[in-house]
Amino acid sequence: MKHCTKARMARSGGAALGLLVPAALFLPMLSGAATAAVPDGDRASWLMHSSQEATDWLSAFFDALAQTPAAISQAFAWGGDSSAWLLVLLTSAGLLAAAALLAFGARKAVAGMFAARAPKPLLWLVYTLTFLLVGVGLHLLLPTTTRVRSIAFAVFLIATVLAAISGIIAGVLRRRRSAERTPICVRAALSVAGIGYFLLILMRISGASLPSHAVVAAALWIVLAVLAVWCIHHLTRLHPPVANEQTGFDDPVYFLLSAHSRWFYYTVLTLITATTLFRIIRFEYLAFAEGTLALLTLGALPALVSLLPDHKTLSSDNGPWRATLIRCGRLVLLICFGLLLAWLLEINLMSMTSDRFGERAARILIDIGIAAALGFLFWQIASTFLNILMARPPIPDAAPHGHVHRASRIQTFVPLLRALVLCFILGATGMIILAAMGVDIGPLLAGAGIFGIAIGFGSQALVKDVISGLFYLSDDAFRIGEYIEIGSVKGTVEGISIRSLKLRHPRGALFTVPFGDIGIVNNQSRDFTIIKLEFLVDFDTDLRLAKKTVREISAEIAQEPELAEAMLEPLKFQGVRRMEPYGMVVGVKFTARPGQQFVVRRETYALIRDRFAKAGIRFARPEVRVGGGQAHDPDVLAAASTVIEGVVTPPKPK
């Protein structure tokens, strides 16, 4: 349930991040287009003016539907009759075939220069450049008219660009082991884009009317958008979803651009489609071409991200800073994608300073995005630094037994420091976001200060706990994993928060102790532990024999690897400590590593019982002896016995 909740939170965060850029780009375009021609002193009538302008555009667009077939015929007539177009096709095919043949030869020659296998990117680059240069050279040598040569060369360039894009896509898919060839949906979309671009250029050169040009561009754009939806659906099915949805918190950009977040691409595609269609209806010549480039940019985004290591590779990498740089690089890549998309859609982000609703909302969204991105970058850097501190190898202290302290102390401090840094970053980011939304944070900060003073007076115990905890941690009184005693409470330190610590009792109970109530701390997990054992033996025990037996037990313990590793000093006989009514109390002691003294003590008890019994050393037991007083005369005892028997034994009947 906890993982499902985190997954839903990550998905919601990804949704907010995915909708931020489209909303920020689309709002100012609508409001800016509607109010561009409205005088500054007459902003109140911008809605009426924009409605009239949109009506005029739509009327002109639909009036041009009947003129579109004639405009297309005019465009093809500009290129010549059917024989001229046949010559164009033959010339274009000849250019492509000759360039491909020579480029293949150049690629084979370069591949032969390498003893091993030549790099595929180098071979692709050699093939593409040779193909392009050969085509340009042959174009200049064609013995045809200038118009036919120009049209054939335009077809050649468009085919070259489409082939290069298709090759790049196929290479990326092979690298991700998704497919060996470019999918048919991608090739269909590239073909429609190339044919549409060629037709629109031909219509513009032939002098076709602007509304007819817009009608053809709109029809081609709708077909291209449908193919783009097909491409997104097909390509996202080739990649499995994120294996661990917890990566949405560690690397939100990777989570956003993975196959599990398909809706992001549909959202951006909707933005590109609506914006381009809006610009086409406004009779902009370059709307179709720039929209096509925007679609190519959207397709290149996951391809570029795939070139970076995935989350599983980063988690198994030994370089934490490398992983952080790659995560930050993904974020920078997403920001650059948004800026490039805005440039292609002709949205000027720097001019969003007016008081219009759309641009004001867009400016707020952009400020929120910048604040969130900076907060993410600072958190990545701080989190990586804290992880390095946690993973730092232990450094031996100058203690005589060479025990380790520093790593454990850092592990105690880092969780508290991580919480403080996270609260600071979230607070600062929240303040910046509120300021971007137009909230005056000055009174808010002043009120927070007064509220903090009120809390300080009203909750002195809480302040005492926090301050006491800081001093206890700075004094290194305890660490996570140590066994301590605080008054009547004892256990292993399991966790430390900002105001309390949690102790796990050996029987399983969990105690939460506020720092202000700790007082004296008895830490039994530092450096070493001295264990003293006492035994009650008879008064006639040979102490020299007992000392020799203890030495033999110590030597036997030293031969056990597990027990020897736990021992810091061997078992020693301490002689008689005191006298008891029933025997002598003798003692032994040993020094063990913290936390391992219980195992050694258990084995020591067992060995002393067995070895003392074998050596004839008896443990004293309480005995009750009844004293009879002075000795009596035998005759008196016999007479008393006779009397007792006479009383006890009744006379026999006669």
Image: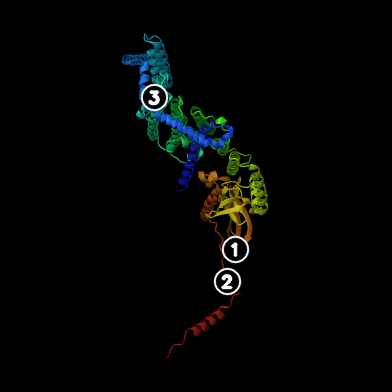
- Judged from the image, the secondary structure of the residue bearing numbered disc 2 is loop
> Residue 555 in the image: x percent, y percent?
54, 46
- Mark 1 closeness class: few <14, some 14–19, many ≥20 residues within 10 Å: some
Residue 478 vertical position relative to residue 29 in the rendered view, above or below: below
> Residue 630 in the image: x percent, y percent?
61, 75
- Mark 2 closeness class: few <14, some 14–19, many ≥20 residues within 10 Å: few
Q: Quadrant of the C terminus?
A: bottom left
Nearer to the camera, 239 or 96: 96
Return the residue at label 2.
626
Could you tell whether 322 is left or right of 188 in the image? Answer: right
For the residues marked 1 and 3, what is the alpha-carbon distance in whole angstroms?
111 Å
> Residue 411 in the image: x percent, y percent?
58, 42
- Mark 3 closeness class: few <14, some 14–19, many ≥20 residues within 10 Å: many
Q: Amino acid at mark 3?
A: Gly
Return the residue at label 3.
196
Return the residue at label 1.
582
